[in-house]
Image (cartoon, coloured by chain):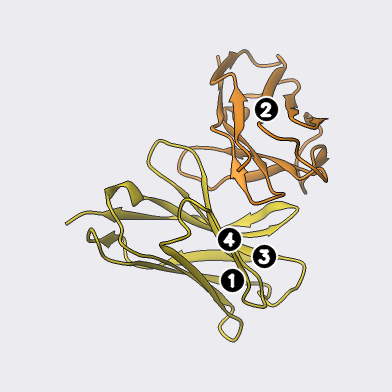
Chain colours: A orange, B yellow
């Protein structure tokens, strides 16, 4: 099983700043099967990024994904108050696992 | 627009079987390019993939739950279902159904299932 470790656990930033979220896998993830989700309290997760760097429908270009192999990054430029949420990475090949999440707080 | 909605009992007794159904509207489950999944989230914790089913009926399960899980699909009703046997308090969670493709593109709102006597 591929284990995904996300860091940091919590990120506290001000509006307008840049957030950099890390996701590290215990094995190489092949075929770019890496996604990122945003989850706000009481809501289902929302797909942000799939295939490492492809933005899902309706996702603003402030959100970007990068990485390869075992190390992946979600970058949120120009943070806005509504970006306050927990962010999860997920690998979907082989099998499916989620990271433990990074909480982004907007000061 | 595709919508998913979970339904089933909100309270299950320990050692019994948890059964949930996901009803899909605005689209069809018998599409070869998608798969249909169950994911759970214990209160205050992260997401855990339970398993998925294809329109053909083939399934994949989380190895940690495989001995207790069964996921099935009913294309005539445009639904897919989850059964989790021998539940304990550790199975208390919000259960989500979701459409898989390139990541999980669509999710149901989730339903809280509490395991308690």
Nearer the camera: disc 1 or disc 3: 3
Tell me which chain the residue with mark 3 is part of. Answer: B
**Tag 4's secondary structure?**
strand
Residue at which label 4 appears: B37
Q: Give me the disc on residue B24.
A: 1
Give x and y (percent) for residue A4.
62, 33
Q: Give me the disc on residue A36.
A: none
Nearer the camera: disc 4 or disc 2: 2
Residue found at x 53% / y 74%:
B72
Badge 2 and badge 3 in a common chain: no
Quarter containing the C terminus of chain A = top right
Badge 1 and badge 3 in a common chain: yes
- Dots 3, 4 in contact, CB < 8 A: yes
Q: Give me the disc on residue A24.
A: 2
Q: Is residue B79 above or below residue A3?
A: below
Residue found at x 74% / y 25%:
A75
Tell me which chain the residue with mark 2 is part of. Answer: A
**Tag 1's secondary structure?**
strand
- Dots 2, 3 in contact, CB < 8 A: no
Q: Give me the disc on residue B35.
A: 3
Q: CA distance from mark 4 to mark 2?
A: 24 Å
Give x and y (percent) for residue A38.
61, 38
Mark 2 neighbour class, 10 Å CA radius: few under 14, some 14 to 19, many 20 or more: many
């Amino acid at each position: 099983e591929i284990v995904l470790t996300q860091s940091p656990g919590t990120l506290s930033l001000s509006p307008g700043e840049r957030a950099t979220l890390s996701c590290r896998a215990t094995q190489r993830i092949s075929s770019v099967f890496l996604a990122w989700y945003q989850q706000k309290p009481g809501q289902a997760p929302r797909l942000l990024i799939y295939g490492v760097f492809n933005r899902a429908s309706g996702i603003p270009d402030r959100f970007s994904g990068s990485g390869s192999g075992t190390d992946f990054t979600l970058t949120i430029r120009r943070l806005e108050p509504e970006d306050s949420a927990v962010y999860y990475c997920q690998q979907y090949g082989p099998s499916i696992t989620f990271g433990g999440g990074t909480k982004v707080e907007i000061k | 627009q595709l919508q998913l909605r979970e339904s089933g009992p909100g309270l299950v007794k320990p050692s019994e079987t948890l059964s949930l159904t996901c009803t899909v509207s605005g689209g069809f489950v018998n599409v070869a390019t998608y798969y249909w999944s169950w994911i759970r989230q214990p209160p205050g914790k992260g997401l855990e993939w339970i398993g998925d089913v294809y329109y053909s009926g083939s399934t994949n399960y989380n190895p940690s739950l495989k001995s207790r899980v069964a996921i099935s699909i009913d294309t005539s009703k445009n639904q897919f279902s989850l059964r989790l046997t021998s539940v304990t308090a550790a199975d208390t969670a919000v259960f989500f159904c979701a459409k898989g493709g390139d990541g999980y593109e669509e999710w149901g709102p989730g339903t809280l299932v509490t395991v308690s006597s």
